[in-house]
Image: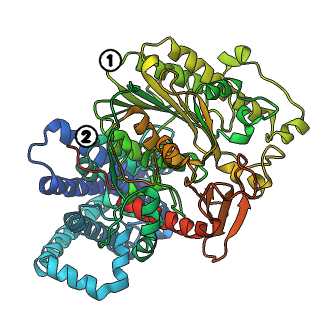
């Protein structure tokens, strides 16, 4: 009889239903994936129905739900990956014993209740503040009594709690049914088959977690490709929005400190911030006279790691940028310009918004609370807007800053070009310039274009197609060190930047837009290092080499060549451009029109604010002084900075005694503006 039973069992194993070969854990996770997808989609349908616009067409709603599904898939993938790992441990298998069955139902039930609570909180938060749920709500815990009173007075708490309870009961019943249905099925183990199914499920969940087939994972900033704040918010998932903002939960400002320094900062900006509840630093600048012809187009080039002391314009003996030095001789060149901070993402932020990125944890571009920003670029009414980057704008979430805030922006990035990708940063700078030139040459309307380079950065790739014409050089290590370079690879990458500039300008000069265009070049940041005898000791000792960059305005038909020694900052770029092309603009940042300031006081009052995130210090450059202090300390350090002015001369600038107040003023005002510089509604 035993043999007969064994043979019978063998027969049943040999021909089971195909689903019996799938582990019950995998079947449970698949069922939960479908269940959670339907649940989160239902929440999004409700949100769109309540907050969406009645006239939104299928062409509008389709992208919202497609992108929303991908955001939801990331959250679901995280939950199920944890479940897959735990369930693969034998003692925690979901159907092993009656006890593990109960634990799994309770655990999944807690997750579902938590999701429902987050979505309900998100719904109420959006209705109250017009913002998705974020970590700022944790601040309400500090005054729980007042917060509770606000909730009680603002919402139908009793009815809401009853409705929530009914929802939880319904979902709990569904969860029990799913678990029972999966558990009732047979499971026929075979060597390796169970492991293969689990590995396959894990791979699918990882794909869902990543969110896209690309170099960078799906990020919250991708929602702003929809070009509409409401639609972007409807596509977002509140779980991801909340988690993304956790790193910035301390992001805030002291209104008392802002008001304390408002008069000083307002005086610098030429605006009365007022005596109201919140200071206002916005000023509306009108266009000047129309007697002179002005450029119709703007090309702004943000240059990767364009460090001043490594360049030819200050006499570097390796003569790394001879072509750019020639451009500087023919344009308006500010040789005493500083970026507010180190890092490309921060540099792009300061250029576009006119506000230093004083975030201490990550960068402002990565902070969902700061994605809404006004930029002077939008005041170029009637101009087409372009942004060209050789790689992906998902890096550092730049897409959120750009697409969300520049109206009508046409963003060209990796995948938009015919040229091949050469490294992690996308296509080569030379090809980036040539492809941008091709696009701009076909424009019949005025345009404002930004080109962001990347090759002057590790891995220092020189494209094979350019190596013969470019001509790599080899310099002894001692000579490299004397001129601020660590290696020949770095030196040649810096030289290749100049090569790309030359190729671009040669192509532009043969294009129809050239004669009517203002070209602007600025480094996104410098590179720390030993400036040797090329600059005063402060450049090396105080790391000014990390912030000192070239700034050039080049328009031969419109601007008289001059080299200006006045202090300049990256935040001054857009106001100065607007002044040159004679556009009225709304300036809500901390920058000023440099050329106008030259007419007013010869640039003597110009200040460049610097925050060194590496050593947590703040400082300002004015005239011949760089005054700095470390965050959290009360003392200040003063060092000679301005190489263009004889040391010891204080006659041109703001008295050094006022510099500490300027430091505090710019820091506190920047923190304030990062969270309040909202772009105005589209007219």
Q: Nearer the viewer, residue 214 or 646?
A: 646
Q: Quadrant of the N terminus?
A: bottom left
Image: 39 above or below 166: above
Q: Residue 35's quadrant in the figure?
A: bottom left
Quote the CA–CA distance across marks 1 and 2. Answer: 31 Å
- Relative to residue 214, is residue 462 drawn left or right? right
Residue picked out by circle 1: 444
Residue 350 locus on image (x, y percent): 49, 49
> Residue sitting at 34 percent across and 53 percent down?
283
Residue picked out by circle 2: 63
Image: 630 above or below 398: below
- Relative to residue 61, is residue 11 drawn left or right? right
Q: Nearer the viewer, residue 441 or 101?
A: 441
Q: Is residue 646 visible?
A: yes
Q: Quadrant of the C terminus?
A: top left
Q: Residue 289's quadrant in the figure?
A: top left
> Residue sitting at 54 percent across and 63 percent down?
361
Image: 618 above or below 577: below
Q: Nearer the viewer, residue 656 or 75?
A: 656
Residue 536 locus on image (x, y percent): 78, 51
């Amino acid at each position: 009889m035993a043999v007969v039973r064994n043979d019978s069992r063998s027969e049943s194993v040999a021909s089971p239903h195909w689903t019996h070969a799938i582990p019950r854990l995998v079947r449970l996770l698949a069922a939960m994936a479908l269940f959670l997808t339907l649940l989160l989609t239902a929440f999004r349908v409700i949100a769109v129905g309540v907050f969406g616009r009645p006239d939104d067409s299928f062409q509008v709603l389709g992208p919202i739900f497609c992108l929303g599904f991908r955001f939801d898939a990331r959250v679901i993938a995280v939950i199920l990956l944890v479940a897959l790992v735990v369930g693969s441990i034998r003692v925690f298998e979901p159907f092993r014993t009656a006890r593990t069955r109960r634990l799994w139902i309770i655990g999944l039930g807690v997750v579902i209740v938590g999701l429902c609570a987050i979505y309900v909180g998100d719904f109420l938060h959006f209705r109250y503040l017009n913002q998705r749920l974020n970590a700022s709500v944790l601040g309400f815990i500090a005054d729980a009594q007042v917060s509770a009173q606000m909730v009680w007075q603002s919402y139908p708490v009793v009815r809401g709690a009853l409705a929530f309870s009914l929802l939880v009961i319904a979902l709990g019943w569904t969860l029990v049914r799913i678990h029972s249905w999966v558990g009732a099925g047979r499971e026929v183990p075979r060597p390796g088959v169970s492991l293969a199914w689990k590995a396959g499920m894990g791979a699918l969940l990882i794909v869902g977690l990543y969110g896209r087939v690309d170099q960078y994972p799906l990020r919250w900033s991708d929602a702003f490709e929809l070009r509409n704040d409401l639609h972007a918010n409807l596509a977002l998932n509140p779980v991801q929005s909340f988690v993304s903002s956790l790193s910035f939960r301390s992001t805030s400002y002291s209104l008392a400190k802002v008001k304390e320094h408002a008069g000083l900062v307002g005086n610098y900006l030429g605006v009365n911030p007022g005596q109201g509840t919140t200071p206002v630093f916005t000023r509306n600048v009108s266009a000047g006279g129309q007697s002179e012809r002005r450029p119709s187009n703007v090309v702004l080039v943000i240059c990767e790691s364009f460090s001043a002391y490594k360049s030819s314009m200050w006499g570097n003996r390796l003569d790394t940028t001879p072509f750019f030095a020639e451009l500087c001789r023919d344009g308006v060149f500010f040789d005493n310009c500083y970026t507010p901070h180190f890092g490309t993402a921060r540099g792009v932020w300061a250029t576009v918004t006119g506000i230093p990125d004083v975030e201490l944890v990550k960068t402002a571009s990565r902070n969902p609370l700061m994605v809404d920003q006004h930029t002077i670029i939008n005041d170029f009414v009637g101009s087409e807007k372009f942004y060209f980057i050789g790689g992906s704008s998902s890096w550092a979430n730049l897409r959120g800053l750009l697409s969300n805030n520049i109206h009508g922006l046409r963003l060209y990035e990796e995948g938009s070009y015919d040229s091949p990708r050469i490294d992690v940063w996308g296509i080569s700078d030379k090809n980036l310039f040539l492809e941008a030139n091709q696009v701009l040459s076909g424009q019949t309307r005025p345009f404002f274009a930004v080109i962001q380079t990347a090759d002057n950065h590790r891995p220092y790739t020189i494209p094979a197609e350019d190596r013969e014409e470019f001509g790599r050089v080899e310099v002894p290590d001692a000579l490299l060190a004397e001129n601020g370079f660590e290696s020949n690879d770095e030196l040649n990458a810096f030289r290749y930047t100049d090569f790309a500039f030359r190729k671009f300008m040669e192509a532009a000069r043969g294009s129809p837009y050239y004669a009517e265009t203002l070209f602007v070049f600025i480094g996104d940041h410098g590179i720390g290092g030993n400036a040797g005898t090329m600059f005063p000791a402060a450049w090396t000792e105080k790391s000014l080499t990390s912030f000192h960059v070239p700034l050039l305005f080049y328009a031969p038909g419109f601007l008289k060549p001059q080299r200006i020694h006045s202090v300049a900052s990256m935040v001054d770029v857009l106001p100065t451009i607007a002044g040159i092309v004679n556009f009225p603009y709304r300036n809500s940042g901390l920058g000023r029109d440099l050329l106008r300031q030259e007419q007013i006081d010869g640039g003597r009052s110009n200040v460049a604010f610097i925050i060194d995130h590496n050593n947590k210090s703040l400082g300002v450059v004015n005239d011949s002084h760089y005054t700095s202090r470390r965050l959290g300390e009360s003392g200040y350090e003063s060092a000679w900075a301005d190489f263009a002015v004889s040391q010891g001369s204080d006659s041109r600038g703001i008295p050094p005694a006022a510099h500490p107040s300027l430091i505090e003023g710019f820091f506190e005002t920047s923190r304030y503006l990062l969270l309040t510089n909202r772009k105005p509604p589209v007219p």
